[in-house]
Amino acid sequence: TQLLEQSPQFLSIQEGENLTVYCNSSSVFSSLQWYRQEPGEGPVLLVTVVTGGEVKKLKRLTFQFGDARKDSSLHITAAQPGDTGLYLCAGAAGNTPLVFGKGTRLSVIA
Amino acid sequence: DVKVTQSSRYLVKRTGEKVFLECVQDMDHENMFWYRQDPGLGLRLIYFSYDVKMKEKGDIPEGYSVSREKKERFSLILESASTNQTSMYLCASSFPDQGYEQYFGPGTRLTVT
């Protein structure tokens, strides 16, 4: 069974601080996706990384896929209250449904 | 934009009732999925479907069934609702490649009393 472990589970920071969220597995994935979910809503895709070592930037968010395609990180620079939410990583491998991590719940305090 | 809609945002049912949750997508996606989301347990896959009239069990299918009579519609059925089925239910759809991004509906928060 493929598993994705996310850490930390909870994170509460002040506005303007930087943070990094991790997504780790012992399995290799062909691609990895990051979603953000706001309270009372469904997850929304932020980015997909496909190549080992790939780095993608989305404004203040930087996503990295590990060289071995087993792990990924999400770094947020100068966090804002609008970044508050549940961040989920999901891995794709073969012809099986996505494997989701349990998520990191981020709270950014103004 | 892809749109996935779910029939209800909030639902309250009694133990033993039969419950139908409907999901409709407008992007001609072949794949559709039903998840439940619980604190500390994350998203858990209940059932998924690759095509009309096809269904596959996910990780936690017990107590649930599904129906896909049309490509755009995927229904989740709780044959006899129980209190441990109180949860947030999320529907999603995607293109055929399982690695393709999933598009989620807003969710249905079901309470079984």
Image (tube, rainbow, N blue to C red):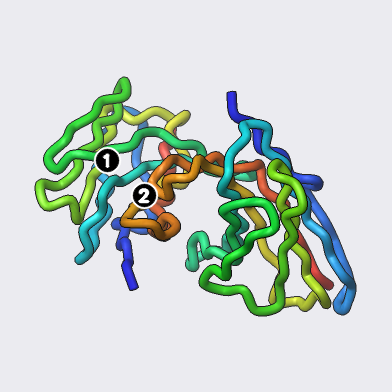
* Residue depicted at 34% across the width and 30% down the height: A79
Image location of residue A74, percent across then percent down? 27, 40
Image location of residue A91, percent across then percent down? 34, 53
Question: Which quadrant holds the N terminus of chain B?
Answer: top right
Q: Nearest the camera: A58 or A14?
A: A58
Q: Which residue is mark 2?
A: A89
**Mark 1: amino acid:** Leu
* Residue depicted at 71% across the width and 52% down the height: B74
Please, which chain is the residue tagged with disc 1 on? A
Residue mark closest to the camera, 2 vs 1: 2
Residue B49 figure quarter = bottom right
Image location of residue B16, percent across then percent down? 87, 78
Q: Which residue is mark 1?
A: A74
Q: Nearest the camera: A26 or A88?
A: A26
Residue B105 figure quarter = top right
Q: How many marks are shown on the rendered structure?
A: 2
Q: Is circle 2 on the same chain as circle 1?
A: yes
Residue A99 is left or right of residue B36, and the answer is: left
Q: Residues within 10 Å of mark 2 (few under 14, many from 20)?
A: many
Question: Which quadrant holds the C terminus of chain B?
Answer: bottom right
